Amino acid sequence: MVAETVGRRQVVGRRPWNTGPPRGHGTKLPWRVVWRRDGVLYLMAVLPVLFLLIFRYGPMLGNVIAFRRFRPGGSIFGEEWVGLLYVDMFINDPTFWHVFGNTVIIGALTLIVGFPLPIVLALLLNEVRKKAFKRAVQSISYLPHFLSVVIVAGMVMQLLSLQGTVNQITEALGGEAVPYLQRPEWFRAIYVGSEVWQTLGWGTILYLAALTTVDASLYEAARIDGANRWRQTWHVTLPGIRPTMITLLILNIGTFLNVGFEKVLLLYSPLTYATGDVISTYLYRVGLVSNNLSYAAAIGLFQACIGLVMVLSANLISRRMTGASLW
C-alpha cells in the first residue's frame, strides 16, 4: 500500500504492478523474470550467435599457422613453430606491397565515391513529392543489390567487351573500340563504377529510414528563421542523420582493405594485375593455388590487424569530434 497526494487529498491505494520501487543501476532482475520477459528474443538470437561462433570466431583459431609451418595432410594447427618467418617474408616481398598499394587505392576510391552518393540520393528523394516517381526510382536503384556478383560481373563484361554495347555505340559515333577489360588503366574505374551501381540504392534505404526520424518542427522553425531549402538541409537534415552517417562510415572504414574478392577475381586477368590485383586475390593465388597456407595466413592476419586499428581509430576520432560513435 502506498500513499499519493493528488491536489490537496491524500489517496491511499495499491501501487500498479509495473511500477515497483526505483531500482539502482546495480540492481539485477532474477534470471527467471528476465527469461519470462525476453525468452523469445534470446531464442531468436541463438542461430545468429551460433553462426558467428562457427563461421567467424572458430576459424580464428587457424591464425596460429601464421607462426607455424603447415603441411598438407598434417595437423590443422601446423607442424612446427617458425615464429615470425612468414611475417618477415611478406614484409620483404615487393609483390605484396604492390598488391597492398592497389588495395588501398581501390578501397579509397570506393569509399570516397560510394559513401556520399547514397546520402545525396536519399536527400534528393526526400524532396520528391510524387510518391509514384519516388517509389520507381527507389525500386530501380536498389534492384542491382539483389543480383549476384557473378551476374553483375557478366553484365560488365558483356557491356565492355570489344563487341559490347559500349564499343558499338563508340563505333557508331565514329570512334574506335577500346578493350576496356584488358587495359590496366581502366580496371579501377570499372570496379568502382560497378560497385557503386550495385550498392547505391541499398545504402539509400538506410538514409531514407533515418530521415523519417528528423523532427518536422525543426524544419518549421528553420523556415520561420528564413532558411531556404539548402540551409534546412545543411542545418537540420544532415545533423539529424549524422549518427547513421558516422556508424556506416566507421563500418566502411573497417572493411577498407577487404576489397570485393569475387568481383575482382571475375573481372581481372593477368593483363590487369598491375592495377587490379588486391590482397584477397593475392591470398587466393598464394594460399590455395600455390598451397602456401601459412604465408597466406600471415598476410591475412596482418590485414585483419590493420582493419581493427582503423575501426578503433575512426571510432575514437568520431567520439572526440562529434560525440557519436559505435561504442
Image (cartoon, grey):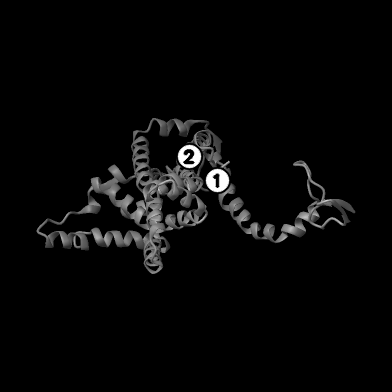
In the rendered image, residue 192, in percent from the top left (x then y), is placed at 33, 50
Q: Amino acid at mark 1?
A: Gly
| Foreground pick, 86 / 186 | 186
Quickly name the residue at label 1: 74
The amino acid type of the residue labelled 2 equals: Gly
- Residue 298, given in percent of the width and then of the height, sits at 48, 38
Mark with earlier residue (2, 1): 1
Q: CA distance from mark 2 to mark 1?
A: 31 Å
* Left or right of 56 in this view: 137: left
160 to the left or right of 74: left
Residue 131: quarter of image = bottom left
- Horizontally, residue 258 falls left or right of residue 266, namely right
Q: Residue furthest front?
A: 8
Residue 24 percent coordinates (x, y): 77, 42
Callout 1: SS: loop
The quadrant of the rendering that contains the N terminus is bottom right
Residue, x 84% and y 55% (percent of image)? Answer: 15
Asked whether residue 214 is in view, the answer is no
Residue 237 picture location, percent across and down? 45, 49
Q: How many marks?
A: 2
From this view, report whether residue 243 is shown above or below residue 86. Answer: below
Q: Are marks 2 and 1 in contact (CB under 8 Å)?
A: no
* Residue at image mark 2: 307
The front one of 222 and 83 is: 222
Vertical placement of residue 143 versus 204, above or below: below
- Nearer to us in this view, 322 or 183: 322
Kind of element beneath mark 2: helix
